[in-house]
Amino acid sequence: MGGTEMKELEKNNEKLRQAVADIKAAILQGQYETCKGTNRIQLAVYYAIGKYVSQHSRKGVWGTGALEAISSQLRRELPGLRGYSATNLKKMRLFYENWIMLDANSSVATDELESAIAIADSAADNSSVTTDDYEKNKSSVATGDLVTIDIYHTLMVPVTRDFPVEDFFKVPFTHHVEIYKLSDLSARYYYIHRTAEEHMPVEKLEKLISEDAYGHRNQMPSNFSKTISNAEVMRKAVMMFKDSYMLDFINVEEIGIRDNIDVDERVVEQEIVNKVKNFIMTIGRDFAFIGNQQLLEVYGVEQFPDLLFFNRELNAMVVVELKMGNFKTSYLGQLMGYLTILDEKIRKPHENQSIGIILCKSANREYVEFMIRDYSKPMGVATYKTADEMPENIRKALPDMEDLRKLLSEKKEV
């Protein structure tokens, strides 16, 4: 090996030794905070290391096999260290590169991150990083004389209203590895929020992403894919119904709230009947109203579904059952009975099987999907809001009902 090659090899080895020292210092700097359960600090460490690795590996500063060499040396210098294999270093690099927009100044205060520089008052007994290790690197970490990784000022947040700041830092790195693979930022935000809100395991997150939960977030939870055999009709049914409806033509405050839930449901039903055109325009196209409280009788037993429609696009009857409270599994059994009678006693030979919809005030989507899957009739569950439940700023922007009546009356007189 010639002198020039030897110098080049030694130069590259020095770069790798520096890289090990830098990454090791960042790990030591963050582990004392991480051991206290601060996920924010751990993400900041991974993000900063990812940036460091990206800037050095993508631009050819390091040679081939650098990440493997760095990882091996880190394990030798920090016995028991986990999570810093060459594969994980690559994941950290992708974490940074897919969230590179976060590497910028923002109006978010940095004192929470800066406070991590202080040594924890008490470290976990089983920490693989010793106090001596930390103290030896503390001065260089704090002053920046040696270390080029700044974990406390690298991971910032963009000044945008929709970025889920708090949720982002609650999501574990293993989950972020799945989320950053998505190119659509809105989809990332959706899964970040759900992960943080539901504390879901990574296996469930992977399943949601594979099923495109984001893409179907506005579609009504149903069992249509299992119960409607005609693929075209199934597709139309899935696309037709939403998971939530704003029945802003109904104002419960004006109607007067009853104490009895059954009475309230009848009141809302009557308002829909009175303004059935508004309801049809809200729920979808090609609906024809058949009637409310339509008598269904079999073996002398009478039943009365709330609202019955026919949809020309689906070539099927659609029964809608109104509920004022939260979703209950008993509603599915009730709806199943209606659909069985409709299909066997009312449906015409050329029509497709009837579809049932439960409209209730609130429903847990995952719970609905779990409970509805084994029913043999096509059913779905949607929620609704009335005008009195609209956001305050929107309600204030709308004209007062009494003023609107006066205005319409004046126009009629003219």
Image (spheres, rainbow, N blue to C red):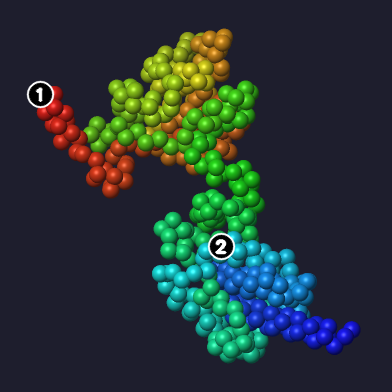
Q: Secondary structure at mark 2?
A: loop
Against 145, residue 402 (above or below) is above
Which label is found at residue 90?
A: none
Q: Mark 1 packing: few (<14 Cα in 10 Å), some, or many (20+)?
A: few
Q: Residue 198 in the image: x percent, y percent?
A: 53, 53
Secondary structure of residue under mark 1: helix
Whether residue 102 is situated above or below residue 70 in the rendered picture: above
Residue that lies at the very extreme toward the right in this rendered image: 1
**The quarter of the displayed image where residue 340 is located:** top right
Label 2 neighbourhood size at 10 Å, few (<14), some (14-19), many (20+)? some
Q: Which residue is mark 1?
A: 413
The amino acid sitting under disc 2 is: Trp
Disc 2 to disc 1, C-alpha distance: 62 Å
- Image-based side of 141 in relation to 304, left or right: right
Give the residue drawn at x 60%, y 52%: 182
Q: Which residue is mark 2?
A: 99
Question: Picture coordinates of residue 192 (x, y %)?
Answer: 53, 55
> Residue 410 appears in which quarter of the rendering?
top left
